[in-house]
Image: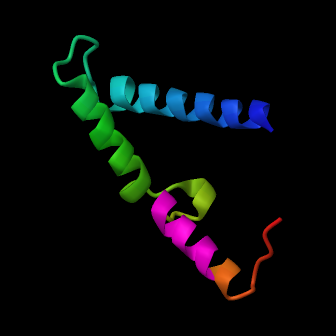
Amino acid sequence: MGIYINGAMEAINGWIKEELFGDLWLSRGADNIQRIIDNYIYYFNYGRPAYALKYFTSIQYKKLYEKRVQNGLLRVG
């Protein structure tokens, strides 16, 4: 299982780098880089719709998933 988690984390790191440095024009010597990354992670989870999640944000999709599990519509494990 560890190899799959690492692959997912590598993909996320790649997306973050591409969007911050490519799409958002962040310079490599930017001040407050930790704040910028923290803000991006918040945006990634709460504000950025994902095609793979049917255009829900990560948090919206997680809540929908948890609700379906609670209502017995999905089985876990």
**In this rendering, position of residue 71 left or right of residue 3:** left
- Residue at the spot 57% in from the left edge and 75% down from the top edge: 64
Colour scheme of the picture: rainbow
Q: Is residue 31 left or right of residue 21?
A: left
- Furthest residue to the bottom? 71
Decide which of 38, 47 is in the foreground and name it: 38
Give above or below for 41 relative to 70: above
Quadrant that contains the N terminus: top right
Asked if 2 appears above or below 44 in the picture, the reply is above
The extreme left residue here reads 31
Q: Position of residue 40 (x, y in %)?
A: 33, 40
Q: Nearer the viewer, residue 24 or 32?
A: 32
Residues drawn in magenta:
58-67
Query: Does the magenta segment cover residue 7?
Result: no
Q: Where 6 sits versus 48, above or below?
A: above
In the rendered image, the quadrant that contains the C terminus is bottom right
Point out residue 45 in the picture as x, y percentages from the top left corner.
43, 53
In the image shown, does 20 or 67 lie closer to the viewer?
A: 67
Which corner quadrant of the image does residue 61 belong to? bottom right
For the question of whether residue 57 can be seen, the reply is no
Q: In this picture, is 31 found above or below 1?
A: above
User: Could you tell me which residue is drawn at 69 percent across and 78 percent down?
Assistant: 69
Instruction: Give left or right: position of 21 versus 60.
Output: left
- Chief secondary structure of the magenta portion: helix
Q: Is residue 69 left or right of residue 20?
A: right
- Residue 71 in sight in this render: yes
Q: In terms of image quadrants, where is residue 21?
A: top left
Percent x, y of residue 34: 27, 28
Residue 58, x across and y down, in percent:
50, 58
Q: Residue at x 69, y 37 (%)?
A: 5
